[in-house]
Amino acid sequence: MTQPSPNPYERPRAEGSSALDALDDTELYVQTLPKPIVRMAGTCGIVLGILMLFLALRLVIAATGLLASLLEAAHVVVGIGTLIAAHGLWRGSIGRLLLGLVLAPVALAACAFATITGSLGGLFGAALAIVTFVLMAMSFGSVTTMAAARAALRRRMS
């Protein structure tokens, strides 16, 4: 049974199907590609991750002791996690997007610590962490569409 569509040019579809099921393979593949907001959020995530690794290197050079070692490890974990989240964001992974949304405020706190200890890179990182968080939050709908299209494409291919 088909439902009437307000668009007379749209193909009729079954009642329980989604809009992605009505697309052919090429149109479905295009839906898996990242939109500009997703690309920008991923790019900011990569720059933030690299900056966090540089801030960790700054701590390795400048400080010694147990607390400094813990802060270095935290910077490295946040930096690598942000890089992983940015890569997954470009691929349309909702889990990696959520990882990025969790790590951005942690990166903000780490960059605030770096700013307090005298690094201007920390000020740049704090602003970049806020921008990354906002862009990742804004790209949630696009990443959800990318993930659904990827899942529909996998269903068709198997």
Image (cartoon, grey):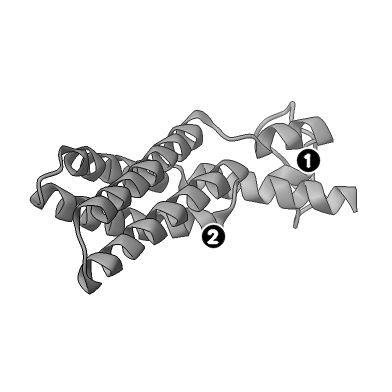
Placement of 46 over or under 108, stated as above or below: above
Image coordinates of residue 80 in percent, x first then y, are 45, 54
Q: Which residue is denoted by mark 2 in the rendering? A: 95
Q: Quadrant of the C terminus?
A: bottom right
Characterize the local packing of mark 1: few (<14), some (14-19) or many (20 or more) Cα atoms within 10 angstroms.
some
> So how many labels did they put on this image?
2
Q: Report the side of 53 relative to 60 (left or right).
A: right
Image coordinates of residue 106 in percent, x first then y, are 29, 59
Placement of 158 over or under 142, stated as above or below: below
Kindly identify the amino acid type of the residue bearing the numbered disc 2. Answer: Gly
The residue positioned 67% from the left and 30% from the top of the image is: 7
Q: Report the side of 93 relative to 17 (left or right).
A: left
Q: Earlier in the sequence, mark 2 or mark 1?
A: 1
Kindly identify the amino acid type of the residue bearing the numbered disc 1. Answer: Ala
> Closer to us: mark 2 or mark 1?
2
Provide the secondary structure element on which disc 2 rests.
helix
Q: Nearer the viewer, residue 44 or 3?
A: 44
Task: Measure how far apart labels 2 and 1 are at the Cα level.
Answer: 26 Å
| Residue 107 falls in image quadrant | bottom left
The residue positioned 28% from the left and 55% from the top of the image is: 60
Provide the secondary structure element on which disc 1 rests.
helix
Q: Is residue 95 visible?
A: yes
Image coordinates of residue 45 in percent, x first then y, are 41, 43
Q: Which residue is denoted by mark 1 in the rendering? A: 22
The residue positioned 33% from the left and 53% from the top of the image is: 104
The residue positioned 75% from the left and 37% from the top of the image is: 28
Q: Is residue 1 visible?
A: no
Q: Point out the residue furthest to the right here.
A: 158
